[in-house]
Image: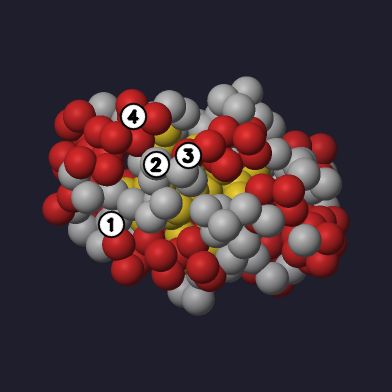
């Protein structure tokens, strides 16, 4: 489990947080990101198309790591696994999700914003977490503080991170990847400007 999570976090320093408004966009949008060098994709359940999008992208882009985001219940966890999600990201933690994630097929990257939530996951063996919402929960200084008591924990911060601030997070020893929606701007997606998405992905990687 931990190996899979670590493989995902080390596969790409940037993790796009994707919301699919039109199902037909799922594959070309994800392909555009992959073409730009990003092969880890977090497809969220924020829209009704999330599950189907995970299924289609898994089939169409076998080389990418396709994960599910915004999973907030065990029922959803089971659904995204059935759809083929290779990893699962939650915005926060519940006891039941943390426990389910210990033995689930797709490993869990649980979201935390406080030390106490982190400790709940830590007690169950989790050492990799999403830090959300990163900017409002303390940003870079909070992650530096976490590294004292929890030196063996690695984070993927998301929430309020932008192209020009991503590298501040990635400079930290306990951050392996950062996530965000800046990689998939709504206006570019709305007009299906896939070359622009590829350019944003490539440029964001180059800026790191
Ligand atoms: C997430 O769920 O990770 C966030 O919504 C992404 O945050 P952003 O939209 O501020 O990048």
Q: Nearer the viewer, mark 4 or mark 3?
A: 3
- Earlier residue among tags 3 and 1: 1
The answer to the question of whether label 2 and label 3 lie on touching residues, with beta carbons closer than 8 A, is: yes
Q: Which residue sits at x=48%, y=46%?
A: 147
The residue where tag 3 is placed is 146
The residue where tag 4 is placed is 117
User: Residue 76's x, y, as percent?
Assistant: 29, 36
Is residue 24 among what the camera can see?
no
User: Residue 82's x, y, as percent?
Assistant: 26, 52
Q: Nearer the viewer, mark 1 or mark 2?
A: 2
Residue lying at the far front of the rendered structure: 148
| 91 displayed left or right of 33 | left
Alpha carbon distance from label 2 to label 4? 14 Å
- Earlier residue among tags 1 and 4: 1
- Earlier residue among tags 4 and 3: 4
Q: Which residue sits at x=27%, y=43%?
A: 122
The residue where tag 2 is placed is 149
User: Residue 114's x, y, as percent?
Assistant: 43, 27
Is ligand 1 closer than 8 angstroms to the Cβ of mark 2?
no
For the residue carrying disc 1, how many other residues have a C-alpha within 10 Å: few (<14), some (14-19), or many (20+)?
A: many
Numbered label attached to residue 85: none
Alpha carbon distance from label 1 to label 2? 28 Å
């Amino acid at each position: 489990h931990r190996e899979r999570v670590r493989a995902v976090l080390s596969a790409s320093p940037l993790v796009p947080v994707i919301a699919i408004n039109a199902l037909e966009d799922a594959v070309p949008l994800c392909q555009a990101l992959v073409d730009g060098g990003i092969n880890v994709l977090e497809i969220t359940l924020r829209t009704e198309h999330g599950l189907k999008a995970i299924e289609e992208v898994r089939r169409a882009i076998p080389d990418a790591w396709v994960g599910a985001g915004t999973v907030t219940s065990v029922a959803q966890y089971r659904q995204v696994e059935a759809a083929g999600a290779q990893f699962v990201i939650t915005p926060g933690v519940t006891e039941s999700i943390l426990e389910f994630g210990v033995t689930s097929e797709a490993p869990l990257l649980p979201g935390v914003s406080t030390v106490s939530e982190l400790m709940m996951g830590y007690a169950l063996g989790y050492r990799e977490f999403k830090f959300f919402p990163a900017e409002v929960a303390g940003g870079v200084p909070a992650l530096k503080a976490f590294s004292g008591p929890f030196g063996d924990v690695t984070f993927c911060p998301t929430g309020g991170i932008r192209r020009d601030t991503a590298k501040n997070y990635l400079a930290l020893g306990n951050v392996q990847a950062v996530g965000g929606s800046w990689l998939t701007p709504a206006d570019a997606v709305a007009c299906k400007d896939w070359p622009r998405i590829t350019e944003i992905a490539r440029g964001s990687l180059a800026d790191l």
